[in-house]
């Protein structure tokens, strides 16, 4: 990969130490290494985003029953604000399309306006709230539930090929 380019690849158990460093740096209430290990063992789509051979982000996508759920998306704080989050989310949506799901869901904290704005500009819409979903400094915080509908193949030839 040429210098300065990013690439998404499957997460490996050997990546978990770096994934955890990024997760701990990015979130006040991070996932645990066990959460990531369980997702790998369950066969969820676990991905890392690399730039110049270093892991700068990660994402976890669960698929089933015609739906996908972005369970985790993280860009290391020192790499935020450069379009990497958009790239990661768009690639997770591409992975969902590959699984032929009808819609993709995610949750986001109302206290994370940058992520909320990113998801809205990609095409996610708020469909509900989960009261007290997230831990917070002063108790609990709601989650905004967002969804994006994935349209079926556009052309008749695509329908025949994908069949």
Image (cartoon, rainbow, N blue to C red):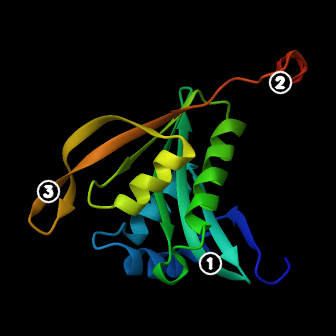
- Residue at image position (53%, 26%) is 65
Q: Quadrant of the C terminus?
A: top right
In the visual, does 143 lie left or right of 85? left
Task: Please tell me whether mark 1 sits on a helix, a strand or a loop.
Answer: strand
Q: Is residue 14 left or right of residue 140?
A: right
Q: Could you say where residue 9 lies in the image, as x and y percent from the top left? A: 71, 64
* Residue furthest left as drawn: 138
Badge 2 marks a residue whose secondary structure is helix
Count of marks, rendered view: 3
N-terminal of the pair, mark 3 or mark 1, is 1
Q: Return the x and y of residue 42 as percentages of the image width and height.
A: 52, 49
| Res 88 → quadrant | bottom right
Q: Closer to the N terminus: mark 3 or mark 2?
A: 3
The spot of residue 39 in percent (x, y) is 49, 55
On the question of residue 137 being in view, the answer is yes
39 is higher (above) or lower (below) than 32:
above
Q: Which residue is mark 3?
A: 140
Look at mark 2 in the image and give the residue it sits on. 162
For residue 59, above or below residue 95: below
The residue where tag 1 is placed is: 55
| Real-space CA distance between mark 3 and mark 2, rounded to the nearest whole angstrom | 44 Å
């Amino acid at each position: 990969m040429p210098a300065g380019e990013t690439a998404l690849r499957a997460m490996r158990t050997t990546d978990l130490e770096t994934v955890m460093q990024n997760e701990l740096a990015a979130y006040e209430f991070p996932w645990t290494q066990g959460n990531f290990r369980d997702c790998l063992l369950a066969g969820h789509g676990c991905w890392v985003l690399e730039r110049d051979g270093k892991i700068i982000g990660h994402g976890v996508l669960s698929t089933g029953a015609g739906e996908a759920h972005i369970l985790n998306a993280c860009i290391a704080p020192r790499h935020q604000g450069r379009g990497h989050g958009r790239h990661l989310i768009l690639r997770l949506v591409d992975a969902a399309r590959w699984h032929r799901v009808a819609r993709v869901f995610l949750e986001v904290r109302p206290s994370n306006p940058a992520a909320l704005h990113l998801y809205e500009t990609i095409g996610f819409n708020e469909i509900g709230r989960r009261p007290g979903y997230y831990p917070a400094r002063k108790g609990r915080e709601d989650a905004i539930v967002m969804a994006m509908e994935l349209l079926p193949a556009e052309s008749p030839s695509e329908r025949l090929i994908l069949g």
